[in-house]
Amino acid sequence: MNAAAGESNFSVRSYLGVYEVQFVDDFVASLLSHLKEGDVLLVDQNVERIYKNRIGSSFDSHRVIRLDPKEELKSYEGVMPIISQLIETGFKKNNRLVAVGGGITQDVTAFISSIMYRGVDWVFVPTNLLSQCDSCIGSKTSINFGDYKNQLGGFYPPRLILQDPSFRKSLDAREIASGVGEMAHYFLIDGEDSFAALEAGVVEALKGGQVVTEFVRRSLEIKRDMIEVDEFDKGPRNVFNYGHSFGHAIEGYTRYAIPHGIAVSFGMDIANSVSVALGLMDAKVQERVFSVLSQIWRGVDFPTIDLNRYVESLRKDKKNIGSNVRVVLSRGIGDMFLERIEIDSLFMDTLEKRFSVYRES
């Protein structure tokens, strides 16, 4: 298929070889051109329902496993029936899994692909903004363990990613805001020029405007450049955890009622506020960034959070080593770093003040 208007394909170097992101204008036709005999499709049942007219009977000649993409699916209990079905229906080492859906469908498919017969190839068609702008590249596979998010997994990239921008037309405002929140953390990490672009375009982006296409492309470029240097998250790539430790704890506390990218937006502001409290960031910079981030979470009801329970969830973050709590802090736009912090009265007071701001905004 031809690349979608204004976009061109690009490749990502991985330890398993080079894989390609292709921008297409018809995901059904493009996927059919790539499907092979024996491939099994793992399809988000909501995507199949929404795009019923476009999909029609196109996948009838291939085995399809329909997934209910709830967070509970991302667990050993969730993936075991899928693995059983694959084995029982004759899935082989040379066959591929093809994921059509968002982040949960991706995580489930990637995790199963990485452990099935010690590794089988997989293809990904990301259908929401969060997976299109972020998780589709980078190799990470993740499932949850109990209430703790993304504790289990590894690194296992797809062999091909098919990006169709038309999926964004069916997304609701919260899904768009979640994607913009995730892209915001890349733009802030990248530096002043990227953040200024976000600052100028965030309102249009949250409305699903054309600028979203430009933001997706730029986010993937920023991420690709980093993962080609540090695919296994051993050093420089750690800065991409900016906002995520704090955000994951919010997700876990609310049992994922707050979407990932929106939780990360809160998380970035918490990281900035802690940085200001520690004398690392100028308060004016925090306020400038807050004015952008607060537009992303506008309209979200922030719950009353027990600080001790929140901190306990934060301690379970997989970036921690031993009893230390390690989070990404910031000295300013484009200057993030991984730091060990103490859970002291200053930290707790900062959290309490920020949570109060979120409840009132």
Image: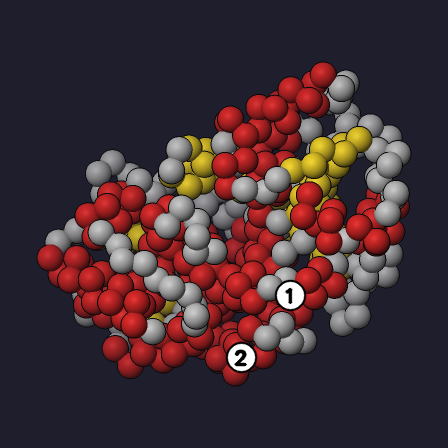
**For the residue carrying disc 2, how many other residues have a C-alpha within 10 Å: few (<14), some (14-19), or many (20+)?**
some
Residue drawn at 77 percent across, 18 percent down? 90
| Label 1 Cα neighbours within 10 Å, binned few <14 / some 14-19 / many ≥20 | some
Going 22% across and 61% down the picture, which residue do you hit? 351
Q: Residue at x 17, y 51 (%)?
A: 343
Disc 2 secondary structure class: helix
**Residue 279 at least partly seen:** yes
Q: Is residue 223 left or right of residue 147?
A: right
Q: In the rendered image, which residue does mark 2 sit on?
A: 203
Q: Nearer the viewer, residue 71 or 333?
A: 71
Q: How many marks?
A: 2
Q: Is label 1 or label 2 in front?
A: 2
18 left or right, relative to 133: right
Q: Of the residues shown, which amino acid type is indicated by label 2?
A: Val
**Residue 289 badge:** none
Element at badge 1? Answer: helix
| x, y percent for residue 203 | 53, 79
Q: Amino acid at mark 1?
A: Arg
Which one is in front, 44 or 345? 44
Q: Position of residue 254 (x, y in %)?
A: 37, 50
Residue 340 seen in this snapshot: no
Q: Which colour assignment does the render follow?
A: secondary structure
Question: Left or right: where does residue 152 sit relative to residue 216?
Answer: left
Of 196 and 203, nearer the camera is 203
Coordinates of residue 320 in the picture (x, y in percent): 30, 42
Q: Could you say which disc has been placed on residue 217 in the image?
A: 1
